[in-house]
Image (tube, grey):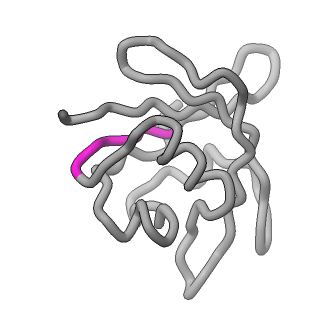
Amino acid sequence: MEIFTKQLNSIDLERGLVLPRDCNLERLQPFHGTIELSTIVESYAGTHLPDPVTIHCSTRSGKLEFTRGWRDIARDAGLKSGDTVTFYREVNGGAQYKMRVRNVG
């Protein structure tokens, strides 16, 4: 169940990933303020980062943003401006968050 897909820009990589306005927030578990989401990161080719990453999601200036944990993903996956990320929730007996990354280069 996809929550959002976003093509990255330099601000997403330097400051934090601001979630798109059209993201499907109903698929996130309800929260106020901040939430930490344990996330498995994989490429579209199917390779995974070795360990799940905990992403800190918070509201800043009225917008949802991935902060802590997101920069680790961007660095470890070699993400650059123009790359695409898809964040989704997979339900197999329990909720699991996953992020698929696609490098343009």
Q: Seen in the image, is 74 located left or right of residue 34? A: left
Q: Seen in the image, is 65 located left or right of residue 20? A: right
Give the main secondary structure, helix, strand or loop, of the magenta stretch: strand
Decide whether residue 103 is among the magenta residues.
no
The range drawn in magenta is 82-87
Residue 46 location (% of width, % of height): 45, 12
Q: In which quarter of the image is residue 48?
A: top right
Q: In this view, does 59 lie above or below 25?
A: below
Residue in the image at 58% along x and 53% along y:
70
Instruction: Pick the residue in front: 92 or 83.
Output: 83
Q: Quadrant of residue 40?
A: top right
Residue farthest along the bottom direction in this orientation: 61
Q: In this view, does 28 lie above or below 62?
A: above
Residue in the image at 46% along x and 35% along y:
77
Instruction: Pick the residue in front: 20 or 41.
Output: 41
Residue 52 location (% of width, % of height): 71, 30
Q: In which quarter of the image is the C terminus?
A: top left
Instruction: Pick the residue in front: 50 or 101.
Output: 50
Instruction: Pick the residue in front: 19 or 51.
Output: 51
Residue in the image at 34% along x and 50% along y:
6
Q: Seen in the image, is 105 located left or right of residue 26? A: left
Q: In this view, does 73 lie above or below 105?
A: below
Q: How many marks?
A: 0
Residue 96 location (% of width, % of height): 71, 28
Decide whether residue 84 is among the magenta residues.
yes
Residue 7 location (% of width, % of height): 28, 50
Residue in the image at 40% along x and 39% along y:
78
